[in-house]
Image (tube, rainbow, N blue to C red):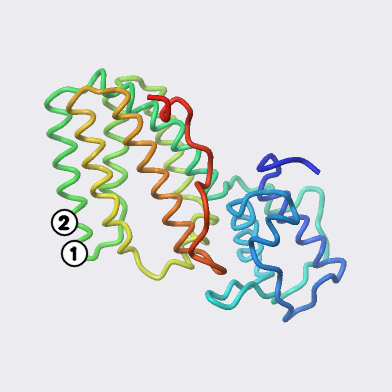
């Protein structure tokens, strides 16, 4: 068995489907808890969470908050070119990890390039984001503007396009939408306002290490909060979802 998270959620999802095909579970049966599945497959709970979202999108299981994970249908087969695997989609937590790695470095570089006009623009976006949330709007336009603007500060078109590509993956992802089906409201997004303020402060000080750490911590906070809010078994999960960047920690 491969160690850790080298086994993607799609592989784990297909192995769970094999178990359903082999009638290890019947319709109406309850699957083991996430923590037990993580031990069984030797992966983190984030990978299990993503694999379960995959099966839920395929209408094979139903995740009931506070109750557990139940089988609602059995697959007939798994083709080698499974339709689901052919689709370009990613797990929500692996997407956040990729954003964390890229955007923390973008913020670090932006701190060396930022101008007074850039800071003014970021503060205006933050004010829009705050007003949007206070009015109960659920769009992510201001949030997207904030992260895109930091990428644009680098004046590097490749970096700008890379950041945009990751955001577009999120917008188009059925997996991302599947995760949020288990989160009843978006009030948690108020937590990101302080994170965004911290990022602006670091940029305004032209402090690359501080900017990198602020962006890293922001996306770590997002990962942990979304994991907690979508948790079926136990909201008191332990530990960081992914290892902290040694570069950030050592600074």
Residue 88: image quadrant is: top right
Q: Which mark is residue 135?
A: 1
Q: Which mark is residue 14?
A: none
Kindly indicate whether the residue at mark 1 contacts the one at mark 2 (C-beta within 8 angstroms): yes
> How many marks are shown on the rendered structure?
2
User: Within 10 angstroms of label 1, few (less than 14), some, or many (20 or more) residues?
Assistant: few
Q: Position of residue 99 (x, y in %)?
A: 45, 38
3D distance between C-alphas at marks 2 and 1:
6 Å
Residue 14: image quadrant is: bottom right
Q: Give the residue displayed 64% in from the left and 60% down from the top.
A: 35
Q: Position of residue 153 (x, y in %)?
A: 26, 25
Quadrant in the picture for the N terminus:
top right
Q: Which mark is residue 131?
A: 2
User: Within 10 angstroms of label 2, few (less than 14), some, or many (20 or more) residues?
Assistant: few
Give whichever of 82, 249 is nearer the camera: 249
Q: Furthest residue to the right?
A: 22
Q: Give the residue displayed 48% in from the left and 50% down from the top.
A: 172
Relative vertical location of residue 99 with respect to residue 60 in this rendering, above or below: above
Quadrant in the picture for the C terminus:
top left
Q: Position of residue 151 (x, y in %)?
A: 32, 29
Q: SS for tag 2?
A: helix
Q: Give the residue displayed 76% in from the left and 60% down from the top.
A: 16
């Amino acid at each position: 068995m491969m160690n850790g998270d080298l086994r993607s959620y799609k592989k784990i999802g297909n192995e769970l489907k094999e178990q359903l095909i082999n009638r290890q579970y019947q319709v109406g049966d309850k699957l083991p808890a996430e923590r037990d599945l993580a031990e069984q497959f030797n992966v983190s709970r984030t990978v299990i969470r993503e694999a379960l979202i995959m099966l839920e999108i395929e209408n094979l299981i139903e995740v009931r908050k506070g109750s557990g994970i139940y089988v609602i249908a059995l697959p007939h087969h798994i083709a080698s070119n499974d339709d689901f695997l052919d689709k370009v989609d990613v797990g929500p937590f692996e997407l956040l990890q990729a954003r964390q790695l890229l955007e923390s470095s973008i913020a670090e570089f932006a701190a060396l390039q930022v101008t007074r006009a850039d800071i003014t623009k970021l503060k205006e976006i933050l004010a829009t984001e705050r007003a949007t949330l206070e009015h109960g709007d659920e769009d992510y336009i201001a949030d997207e503007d904030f992260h895109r603007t930091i990428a644009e500060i680098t004046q590097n078109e490749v970096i700008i396009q890379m950041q945009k590509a990751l955001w577009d993956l999120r917008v188009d992802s059925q997996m991302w939408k599947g995760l949020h089906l288990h989160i009843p409201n978006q009030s948690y997004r108020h937590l990101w306002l302080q994170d965004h303020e911290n990022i602006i402060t670091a940029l305004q000080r032209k402090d690359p290490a501080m900017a990198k750490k602020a962006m890293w911590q922001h996306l770590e906070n997002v990962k942990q909060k979304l994991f907690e809010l979508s948790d079926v078994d136990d909201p008191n999960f332990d530990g960081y979802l992914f290892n902290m960047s040694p570069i950030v920690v050592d600074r």
